[in-house]
Image (spheres, coloured by chain):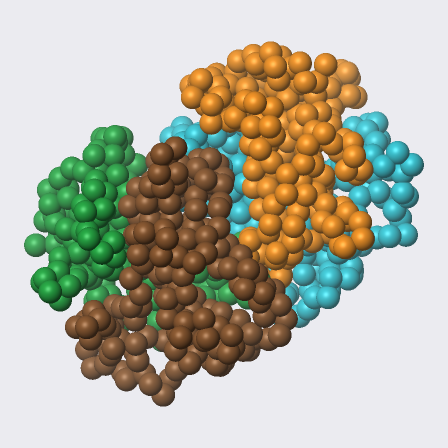
Chain colours: A cyan, B orange, C brown, D green
């Protein structure tokens, strides 16, 4: 039995409304105005082999901070760059999708920072399309750096995306995207 | 099946390894190599009045992206700026803590993007110290923008932080910080 | 006699084409394909009193880098934020101008980094509209931080902007902007 | 009128104070409190073949802004990434230099934005070590994007760097670096 059933994740899914996609009909205004985290349900594997795609990124000096390590906000840039490369790899470049009037809002993101990244590290961002609904999908990520002997896990993450029209209205995922999950 | 699998929120605390503050070996010992999200357990209220502190930030043009809205990675910068102002408000400026050899790593973060932020928006970032352990604490956030009539909820978030020495070793929270929660 | 006459600035002005504004008719393809720096001719004063406007910005932690100081790219963000505040101060908010179909491309920028900025510094960005042509204008900047006794000069800078339509075509400056210089 | 006013490029070198590497008092001694731009004297060629090195960078979505083009501050990140790759190419990786207690402050930078960069563009950043003094050096840059037929010039730039100790004191360039110019 998956934790999903035990956690209040299921109910939450109907609660959270991402930017623009606002599935209003399924939003039950909770009486106590407390929102349950989390809609996201994907559980990123810590084994690189569980991911069908990866993309390598060199850490820029500008991405470090005065702690001497990569600032935690930059991980989102690495994940986005990897999504873009994954879509290109699938034959559906993001730029092309945008020209067709589709877009993918980020509705939620979750990152676990396990070990710091440093300047000049070569980060392998592993990506997997974890699940999809009619109008949204989840991606899970694993970031590793090879220390010379083996890949070392640095971070894991999940993002949830809503498919929208250019005007920001929720719309169905393209068929090819849903097909990847099933 | 251990309680760990059934109660991920609590048990995961022992599982997840933040940057620098916990050895990753407890992770690698897991048989199924799947890490449970999430350690974080705070549930950000959607009512601004539930937060004891807020800080107002004007959205910079450079923080927008080609979708015409604020890029999702920038929210982490707004949250960090608000943490810094909160510590100053408490009489314990972050710069001072760093000089004393303490630091606060970000171990986890979670953001729900509800409605987009736009250039020039005045964002009120509401902050609450949600919980604390001996060496870590959680902050919850609510971001609102006043549309002229009332505050509109734009995002909610949680960050988990580990208290470390300058060398990156986990260490006890300062007493004044733990006292804020109890 | 201004430096402008002594420098090869004049010829350069006709050469450089900013993003989108491309005053093609005045572009003489130089035979040796070497472009003269610089079009910009403003000379930022090092005296704060020479600037009619200033805006105070607190340095974010995320703006530092592993050298422990503010990354040199962030200064451009401070200058942009100050321009936006200056336009608001003049009663012509940038957001409003954009809605009216006007925009200001950055054609050139020049920064002299004199002393490092650090986390938590309160930076006063002094700004002056230095000069204007029919379709472009120059701003000069001085960044100071008060060390408790007096303002210390940290950086000076110049930006050159072209006024364009939303479609990116060069267009006349609004009258109120040209009037500020004369 | 001193030669300084007539030959700003040369004389200014003695005038301008970069971060950490030169005391600002020589500036404050100036009677008219006006600083001459510019120390930098390199003139970036517009012909890619004039550059001995280039590095290709893919524009990230997060680097665009609400104008739909790459924000002008990001160009500095592309230039820095290219410098780092150039040093690696020369067999003197930046990370190694920093471990040896050397660093390179950015003292000045100048960018001419000629045509906008866009999301997903493959930008070739051409780099040349343009000149060097005992303690500083200048790099010139050309950014091009191939439109399918030929490289199109998007921007040109110059940066001036001071060689410092880890403590921020000016120090001699390594011999191998000076040798590259002569």
Would you identify the image quadrant in which residue D123 lies? Answer: bottom left
Q: How many marks?
A: 0
Q: Does residue A151 lie above or below A129 as drawn? A: above
Near-viewer residue (B140 or C43): C43
**Residue A50 placed where, x, y %?**
61, 37
Q: Nearer the viewer, residue A44 or D167?
A: D167
Q: What residue do we see at 53% from left, 71% from top? A: C103
Where B65 sits versus A126, above or below? Answer: below
Residue C127 appears left or right of A35: left
Tell which residue pokes out farthest to the bottom in this image: C25
Quarter of the image where the N terminus of chain A is located: top right
Whole-percent x and y of residue C29? Answer: 27, 83
| Residue displayed at 31% across by 48% down | C113
Q: Is residue D142 left or right of residue B133?
A: left
Q: Is residue B37 visible?
A: no
In the rendered image, residue B130, in percent from the top left (x then y), is placed at: 71, 25
Residue at position x 50%, y 54% in the image: C81
Q: Is residue C161 left or right of residue A14?
A: left
Q: Residue at x 62, y 17 (%)?
A: B177
Q: Is residue D20 left or right of residue C63?
A: left
Locate residue A7: give its quadrant: top right
Residue D50 percent location from the top left of the image: 21, 67
Q: Is residue C161 visible?
A: yes
Q: Is residue C1 above or below residue D137?
A: below
Residue C13 vs A69, above or below: the answer is: below
């Amino acid at each position: 039995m998956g934790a999903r059933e035990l956690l209040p994740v299921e109910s939450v899914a109907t609660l959270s409304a991402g930017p623009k996609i606002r599935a209003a009909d399924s939003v039950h205004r909770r009486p106590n105005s407390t929102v349950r985290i989390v809609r996201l349900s994907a559980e990123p594997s810590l084994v690189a082999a569980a991911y069908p795609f990866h993309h390598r990124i060199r850490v820029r000096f500008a991405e470090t901070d005065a702690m001497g390590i990569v600032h935690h906000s930059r991980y989102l840039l690495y994940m986005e760059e990897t999504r873009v490369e994954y879509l290109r790899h699938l034959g559906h470049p993001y730029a092309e999708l945008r020209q067709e009037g589709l877009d993918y809002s980020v509705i939620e993101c979750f990152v676990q920072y396990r070990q710091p990244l440093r300047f000049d590290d070569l980060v392998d961002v592993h990506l997997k399309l974890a699940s999809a609904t009619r109008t949204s999908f989840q991606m899970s990520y694993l970031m590793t750096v090879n220390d010379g002997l083996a890949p070392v896990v640095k971070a894991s993450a999940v993002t949830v995306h809503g498919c929208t029209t250019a005007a920001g209205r929720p719309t169905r995922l393209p068929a090819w995207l849903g097909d990847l999950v099933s």
